[in-house]
Amino acid sequence: MAKEQLTAREAGLIQCLDCHLLTAKGHGIMETHCPRCGAKLHFRKSTSLARTWALLISSLILLFPANLLPIMTVTYLGEKQPNTIMDGIEHFIQSGSYFIALLIFFASILVPVFKVMGIILIMISIQKKWKTRLRHKTLMFRFIKFIGRWSMLDIFVIAIMVALVNLGTLTAIVPAPAVTYFATVVVLTILAANTFDTRLIWEDTK
Amino acid sequence: MVTSQSNPKTIDPRGLIACPECDLLIRGTDPGPGVKTLCPRCGCTLFQVKKDSIERTLVLSLAGLILFVPAMVLPIMTLDAMGIERTSNILQGIKALFQDGFHMVAMVVLLTAVIVPFLKLLLLFYVSVAIRIKANLSNPALGFRFYQRLDEWGMLEIYMLGILVSITKLTDLAHVSYGIGLFCFVSLLAIPLFSSVTFDKHQYWALIGRSADK
Ligand SMILES: [Zn+2]
Ligand SMILES: [Zn+2]
């Protein structure tokens, strides 16, 4: 078992994150490219923590306008009504579509918040060197990465409704400012999950 | 001609693999087709050997390319309210966002629902042809790397869920009917679903590496 605990880095091997080929680190060479696919090789993703922090803090700030400002303006029979994400969910509850209400609540509110908080928690635990529950943290990150993209749901719903519900000045749906903030949050959190290197969770943990 | 059975040991000439999520070094085992190999430390899936991965992916990506244009251009659904009919497809939604001045959001939708899904199919087809039919196509490695990086930015399955939500939202407001575009769209969606069942990226890399050596 002792031999199995060796990591690629400790063995002097760099794993290519694109094609998973292992390459021995040459002496004195600052930068190496993968001999199979040509990608740049690093033992760990470069400046992973700093980049991930920057992206997460930006997302955290933008989450406020994304949730508090109206995401679309619904005009029904001449009556204009700005709608936030939460208003949209309330509409679904009132019309009895509980499943859709739950779906939008998950995709638009719970997932982005959970994603930002979850990665922040993992990063604090790395920087404070809390070496417990490593497998749980890896599993949580894997889950965050998997569900993160689904937050795009509300953006797509708006894109569909805006084109479809356009019946003159009396009845129309028009996007409102929060849609830009929300789309930015989704893109930034996906980028944050990409710049984060899960191998940092397992660094020096023997 | 390269045989369709690839040895998972070709992941590395020394028979070693490293876990992409925790960097643990593992001796490459030799599982049969369909067997999943998990990392003993963090539990991530290391590889899963699949049968005829490249042939199937080649055919599926070609089918996807053929279905792509009708799925984007034909009407997905029609709204009938107060005597006015409105049809909609993906491109019209993007155009409406542009016209309302939400350029950044329109670009995000254009990339995730149109450009990236199309590029993914095209790259997968190109790399599969380069490996299987062995035309002297240049740089399959770069193509496949690009495909892997783009992968999560293609969001057609999420768009499909968006269609379902919109239908539910609009049925109390007006009469909604479905267009032929929706059927093309659903078939297009089924393709990545099938190809992820038969898709084996390590087999691709092993074969790309082998042809690069020659
Ligand atoms: Zn590589
Ligand atoms: Zn692992």
Image (spheres, coloured by chain):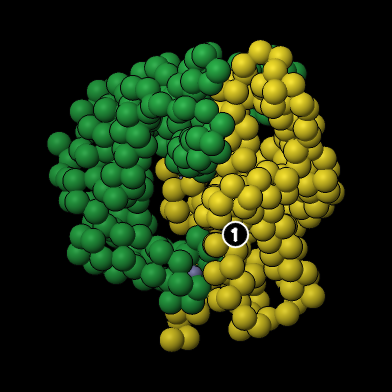
Q: Nearer the viewer, residue A45 or B118?
A: B118
Residue at label 1? Answer: A144
List x then y, in percent, for residue A86.
73, 49
List x then y, in percent, for residue B115.
51, 25
Horizontal placement of B82 versus A173: left or right? Answer: left
Q: Residue sitting at 24 percent across and 54 percent down?
A: B50
List x then y, in percent, for residue A172.
67, 22
Looking at the rendered structure, the kind of residue marked 1 is Ile
Q: Please identify the quarter of the rendering in which residue B15 is found.
A: bottom left
List x then y, in percent, for residue A129.
75, 77
Q: Locate the C terminus of chain B by quadrant.
A: top left
Q: Is residue B124 above or below residue A172?
A: below
Q: Residue furthest bottom?
A: A1
The kind of secondary structure element at disc 1 is helix
Q: Please identify the quarter of the rendering in which residue A119 is found.
A: bottom right
Q: Is residue A159 visible?
A: yes
Q: Residue sitting at 20 percent across and 60 percent down?
A: B33
Chain to which mark 1 belongs: A
Q: Residue sitting at 52 percent across and 28 percent down?
A: B174
Chain yellow in the figure, letter: A
Q: Locate the N terminus of chain B by quadrant.
A: top left
Q: Is residue B32 above or below residue A31?
A: below
Horizontal placement of A56 versus B123: left or right? Answer: right
Q: Is residue B131 visible?
A: no
Ligand 2 lies under 8 Å from the Cβ of mark 1: no
Q: Nearer the viewer, residue B50 or A88?
A: A88
Q: Residue sitting at 19 percent across and 46 percent down?
A: B52
Chain green in the figure, letter: B
Horizontal placement of A147 versus A50: left or right? Answer: left
Neighbour tally class for label 1: few under 14, some 14-19, many 20 plus, Cα within 10 Å: many
Q: Nearer the viewer, residue A170 or B2?
A: A170
